[in-house]
Amino acid sequence: MPRDAPARGEDRRGPGRPGGNGFVHGASQVPANYKIPAHSHPTDEHVTVLSGTLYMGMGDTLDPEGGTALTVGGFALMPAR
């Protein structure tokens, strides 16, 4: 999550270091209707939805109406920028 993201539920990180080389595993639990500000990552981001629905999009600004819905079991790859 970006540093300027609103307060959320819980983040867990596995092995690896964000911004470093190699794969990093993390899990985030967020409240309903949570909005993550537009941001980018230096490495690819793999997202799997474990419960609920996540709306994802690409771009430099948050567009709540233009997101793609990912439901339980859904997977997305957000490429590095």
Image: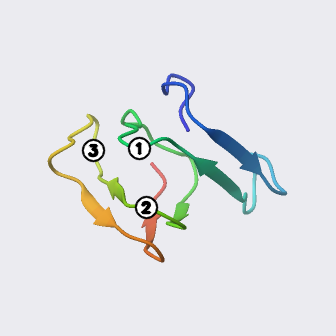
Query: Residue at (37%, 61%) from the top-left corner?
Result: 53
Residue pointed to by mark 1 = 32
Q: Is there any visible trace of residue 41 in the rendered image?
A: yes
Q: Amino acid at mark 2?
A: Gly
Q: CA distance from mark 2 to mark 1?
A: 9 Å
Q: Is residue 36 above or below residue 75?
A: above
How far apart are the alpha carbons under marks 1 and 3? 22 Å
Viewer-side residue, 8 vs 41: 8
Q: Residue 56 sits in which quadrant?
A: bottom left
Helix, strand or loop at disc 3?
A: loop
Q: Where residue 43 appears, x then y in whole percent? A: 58, 54
Quarter holding the N terminus is top right
State the residue at coordinates (50%, 22%): 4
* Contact check, label 2 and label 1, Cβ < 8 Å: yes
Decide: few, some or many residues near mark 1? Use Cα within 10 Å; few <14, some 14-19, many ≥20: few
Residue 50 in percent (x, y) is at 55, 67
Please, is residue 61 above or below residue 72 in the view?
above
Q: Which residue is mark 2?
A: 52
